Amino acid sequence: MNAPPMAARWIATASELDEVLDAAGTAERYFLDTEFHRERTYHPHLALLQLTWPGAETVLIDPLAVDAAPVARLLTGPGLAVLHAAEQDLEVFEHVCGVVPVRMFDTQIAAGFCGFTTPSLATLVESLVGVHLSKGDRLTDWTARPLSESAKAYAAADVDHLEQLHDELTARLQASGRLAWALDECELARQRTRQGRDPDMAWWRIKETRALRGKARGVAQAVAAWREKRASEVDQPVRQVLPDLAVAGIAHRAPRNGTELREIRGLDERHLRKGAAEGILAAVQRGIDLGPDDLRLPPVDDTDRSLRPAVTLLTAWLSQLAHDLHLDPTVLATRGDLTALLNGDPEARLARGWRAELVGEPVRRMVDGEVALAFERGKGLVMEPRASRA
């Protein structure tokens, strides 16, 4: 059925916000979402915050009219924050409030343990609640004031059904014995946001730097780190501060002065204003001087040649295991997770928590020759003890 529009209360003063936070702070759980823009900025700019809790009306907090920083006291309170696909929302909270929720349940993550594959909120609400959400205008300018009534209704719908989703997903997870798995995964997602971006790893995201070798890698690391910090300071997208092609060109040629810098492809004067040229040249020198121990290399997504056949077999087994367990395959394990485990990475997801028992240990036993994968009609791939080891 189609969801009827629900009235939402507009919050635009500090006193109204205090009243809302006092009431929501007494709830055992509350339901959140945000609308923001970042197309022309480095940091996400909060344009609307949607909030409700059991027995309460939905409120729409206008951060353009009232400082949203006090929402931190709700996020750090005892209640459980329930969100859908929370990664970007958490970044918004970190930027605006300086904190993220101390307890969090992400309905998209939880749904992955119930067999859904990265579902949208609309898909999940329709599947579990039986309500069809209007797609609305996804290109709404959320900074416009006043917002249309349809835009407000669309925004409110993002939290109106989270209570039912939380109830249904929790019941399913408890029945399958996977609630602890889902909660662990939600906590990992919450913690990742607090770690923030490491500027020294920014060069990993630049495709053109992957073929660099020697000192050029250090220059790429230092220049990309400078770009990341500069973008944060001036609140501009990183590619407006310095295009990817320019970072790669600077790393390759290591310019020593302004004349050589201006010869780099992809650079023009707008990238070199307000001390940027001096900052880039200083970063180039830092990169040249970078010692081997300070070079941050991207993880190697490859395994020893002798283990490559095992990766192929195990990838097929993991796909089947996820299907048999009604799990989102990416929740269970990715090929990168498998590679990290086989490479002995101590931070590998398959070496920790519930995945270690479910996947990590069987993989270890197969690689050590204790078990083998065989095909059995009607069952597919099965792990069984090797006859020579039985």
Image: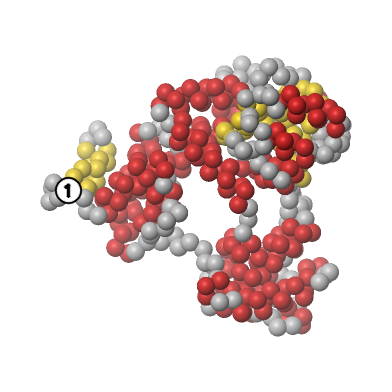
Q: How many marks?
A: 1
Q: Residue at x 72, y 36 (%)?
A: 73
From the viewer's perspective, is 10 left or right of 228? right
The answer to whether 160 appears left or right of 125 in the picture is right
Amino acid type, residue under disc 1 in the picture: Arg
How was the colour assigned to the protein in this rendering? secondary structure
Q: What residue is at 50 percent from the left and 35 percent from the top?
A: 183
The answer to whether any part of residue 228 appears in the image is yes
On the image, the x and y values in percent for residue 141 come to 79, 39
**Between 133 and 237, the one nearer to me in the picture:** 237
> In this rendering, is residue 380 above or below 386?
above
Q: Where is residue 345, by image quadrant?
A: bottom left
Q: Which residue is mark 1?
A: 386
- Under tag 1, what secondary structure? loop
- Residue 72 in the image: above or below residue 271: above
- The quarter of the image holding the N terminus is top right
Instruction: Using the image as rendered, state which of residue 236 and residue 200 is in the foreground.
Output: 200
The answer to whether residue 24 is above or below residue 261 is above
Is residue 158 visible in the rendered image? The answer is: no
Q: Residue at x 66, y 20 (%)?
A: 54
Percent x, y of residue 192? 57, 48
Residue 91 is left or right of residue 120, and the answer is right
Instruction: Judge whether 245 appears above or below 181 on screen.
Output: below
- From the top left corner, tell me how far across and down residue 72 is, in percent: 72, 38
Query: Crowdedness of circle 1 by 10 Å Cα count: few (<14), some, many (20+)?
Result: few
Q: Nearer the viewer, residue 27 or 84?
A: 27
Identity of the residue drawn at 25% across and 55% down = 368
| Residue 71 position in % (x across, y down) | 74, 36
Q: Quadrant of residue 237?
A: bottom right
